[in-house]
Image (cartoon, rainbow, N blue to C red):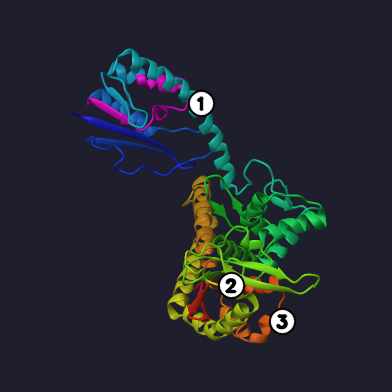
Amino acid sequence: MSVFAYTYTDLLLETTPESDIWGEWEVERVYEDLRTRFSKGENTRSQLQKLLADCCTSTPQYLLVRRLEELGDSLEEVRSRMLELQSLGITLVAIEQGYNSSENTLNSRLELINLIQNLQYQQRSRRIRQAHARKRLEIAPPPGKVPYGYKRGQSKYIVDRTTAPVVKDFFENFLLYGSLRGAVQYLAKKYHKKISVTTGKRWLTNPVYRGDTAYKNGEIISNTHAPIITKEEAAQVDRLLRRNSRLPSRSASAPRSLAGLVICKQCQSPMTITRVTTRKKDKEYLYLRPISCPQKPKCGAISYSEVLEKTIAVVCRDLPQAVAGINSPETEIVKHNLSDEISRHQQILAQIPELVDTGILDVETAKLRAYKLRTEISALQAKFATLPPVNLSSVAQAISIPQFWFDLSESERRFYLREFIRQIEILRQDTNWKVGIVLIF
């Protein structure tokens, strides 16, 4: 049994298929066409023409394709080539669509009609995606609504001077207090700009505000337009979001610095902050008590201020040593390797114009290569941004002084505690107790 296979790959939209896509079929010959030139209307399928010529001299029993639309750019082209294969007595199999031309039942004919109708939609969709892909190669913004704070320029986003300050202030408030809900409420109060918490989170994670362009396929190109926040601020935003994701949703914006961090080690229950006041007196007392303690008798409440003082003492004692372990030679090696890899990609990118001038690369291939290099650089930079900042040791030394903590407001103290602490554990010993901390590193 002789089996041929044919694939057509548009490099603007997809990568070349793997050799094992044919499954259990034992393929004798594979013909592959690559669309490598991206000007409109250009379509060369030299391998398909060779396949049809070879079928006349050495006719296979089966021809495998992934999808019927790979046989042409129009419905008429696909129909013509299907008829040509049929006249040669070749069975056409579209493996991703479950089509087999040897089946001549009513159901198979109905399936073919549905496939042809779907083919028209797929080809129209492909033309639209090709147009969008050509714009990606030009590093043009994607279609759709422009993010708040920007307006659309001829080939890139332009900062909107009337709305960008609102976005900038939103980011600064979040960086200062680490509270998404608080930043949303701040916008509503100061600018009468009402957005949902979900919208606020989209702002915080939107690459556009960082000067990058993100496309629907998930690829990101760095430094395509003027940013509203710096790369360092963006890295801090990401750290704060990762930190807040470990907390209960309401605790992330709670006014007290220990909210969402404390757990009773004995009963494994999270501890909530309760407020007690005396009648006709302004003074209030804060306590930490387990939310759902299964013990009998239940674990008792503990003074909030005492837990805070002991937590600060433990942080000042343990944090410098923990940070020293982070900035280890292994971490520095990773940073160095990533920096070298980014530099290497940038050097290759800088050589592309010269390769075009000397004729080694044509313009379209050069655009595709440059695009892929830019996406790889963006991915490496994102990986580099997740590493600990270089000034972490100096920060740890500064905040290991107890007075530093007591000079802060509760919201500022909340920011720093959550930056370094994953969990605070209350370790009970008969009538006594002590504090243990689990650092993020």
Residue 347 position, x and y percent, is 51, 64
In the image, is residue 437 part of the stretch drawn in magenta? Answer: no
Q: Distance between the residues labelled 3 and 1?
A: 65 Å
Mark 2 / mark 1, whichever is N-terminal: 1
Above or below, 396 against 290 in this view is below
Mark 3 / mark 2, whichever is N-terminal: 2
For label 3, the residue is 407
Q: Nearer the viewer, residue 32 or 231?
A: 231
Asked which secondary structure carries label 2, the reply is loop
Mark 3 / mark 1, whichever is N-terminal: 1
For label 2, the residue is 301
Magenta residues span 58-82
Above or below, 153 against 290 in this view is above
Query: Of the residues shown, which amino acid type is indicated by label 1?
Result: Tyr
Q: Residues within 10 Å of mark 1 (few under 14, many from 20)?
A: few
For label 1, the residue is 121
Q: Distance between the residues labelled 2 and 1?
A: 66 Å
Q: Which of 168 and 68 is in front in this view?
A: 168
Q: Residues within 10 Å of mark 3 (few under 14, many from 20)?
A: few
Numbered disc in front, either 3 or 1: 3
Q: Distance between the residues labelled 3 and 2?
A: 26 Å
Q: Which residue is drawn at 26% across and 31% down?
A: 4
Numbered disc in front, either 2 or 1: 2
Query: Of the residues shown, which amino acid type is indicated by label 2?
Result: Ala
Asked if one can make out residue 41 in the rendered structure from this viewpoint, the answer is no
Query: Of the residues shown, which amino acid type is indicated by label 3?
Result: Asp
Numbered disc in front, either 3 or 2: 2
